Image (tube, helix red, strand yellow):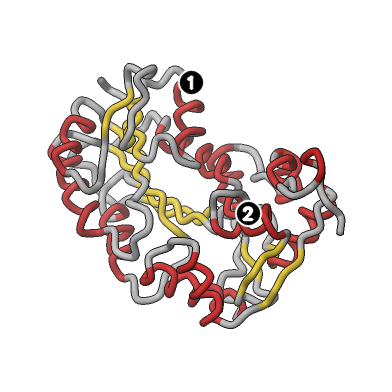
Amino acid sequence: MTGVLVTGGTGKTGRTLTELLRGSGVPVRVATRTPSVDDPDAVRFDWDDPASHAGALRGVDRVYLVPPPLTTDPLPQVGPFLAAAERAGVRRVVLLGSAIVLPNAPGALELAAQVRARPGWAVLRASGFMQNFLAPHPMGERIRRHGEIRTAAGDGRVGWIDARDIAAAAAALLTDPDLPSDDAPGAGSDHLLTGPKALSYRDAATIISAQTGRPVRVQLVGVDEAVRGLRASGMPAQLADALAAVDARLGAGKEDHVSTAVLELTGRPPRTFAEFVRDHATEWVDPGAPEGRPRHS
């Protein structure tokens, strides 16, 4: 099967990417821990089970790579997979990386460097997902249940990006006909993906409130309290510590970046946060409101 292996194939970006590729006539193998019986091209894939990797890679020449979630160091699991992909004849890998670097997490940086070192391979350094404002993400769940965002980021801004735009950028790279040969010179590419404007949590809350009629407030907290909240949501302690530290970094203005990469790769600008909110307005309905309507008090 000459085509694309989509890891995380049922996730935020993988599901949309699969639809885009299949809509363009590209064969896709959907890799997930629980493959759908209704999809003949779905295959079991588990980062914790290396025995599932060879079958997923067999016959494909391109891979969309979503590293294992809930870890600050994906390299021990992903490094051997990349080596197996090269042995299997994969000619292009598009890695979903992050523009926001976790503290004390050199493995993620090394993984991105390994991908960039290979001709024709690419790293997508995506900014914060707009989908984080939706359940089941802990922040989205708190908005839905309590109408509140708790953050240690102060008025720091992020170039929030819609996962659908990340998928579109990945599709553009994975359908580029100029795949490299085995002896191609040079290195891969790196793309910073953001939305069209950097927004603070207060900005985002204001837009959600205005578009949905659901009041959303921002509660500023310290880093320690942010850690406790993330751990209480079930997040592993090390990752919770790292994400709370990132919040503090946001407050210092360290992630206030906007790029034009989505436009350059796809030919259209990325979605605005207001467009994202309009598309998902019903998902912020207050579960305690009568008849499912937003509650305004």
Earlier-in-chain disc, 2 versus 1: 1
Q: Is residue 199 left or right of residue 59?
A: right
Q: Which residue is mark 1?
A: 24
Q: Quadrant of residue 104?
A: bottom left
Q: Is residue 278 above or below residue 249?
A: above
Q: Is residue 167 left or right of residue 68?
A: right
Task: Give percent across and percent down for residue 174.
Answer: 40, 34
Q: Residue, x 71% and y 47% (percent of image)? A: 287
Q: Which residue is mark 2?
A: 133
Q: Quadrant of residue 117?
A: bottom left
Regarding residue 86, the answer to whether it shows in the image is yes
Q: Quadrant of residue 8?
A: top left
Q: Locate the N terminus by quadrant.
A: top left
Count of marks overlaid on the render: 2
> In front: mark 2 or mark 1?
2
Q: Is residue 231 above or below residue 253?
A: above
Question: Does dot 1 land on a helix, a strand or a loop?
Answer: loop
Task: Give percent across and percent down for residue 213.
Answer: 85, 50
Q: What type is the residue that disc 1 sits on?
A: Ser
Q: Residue, x 72% and y 69% (percent of image)? A: 218
Q: Is residue 227 above or below residue 211?
A: below
Task: Give percent across and percent down for residue 210.
Answer: 85, 53
Q: What type is the residue that disc 2 sits on?
A: Phe
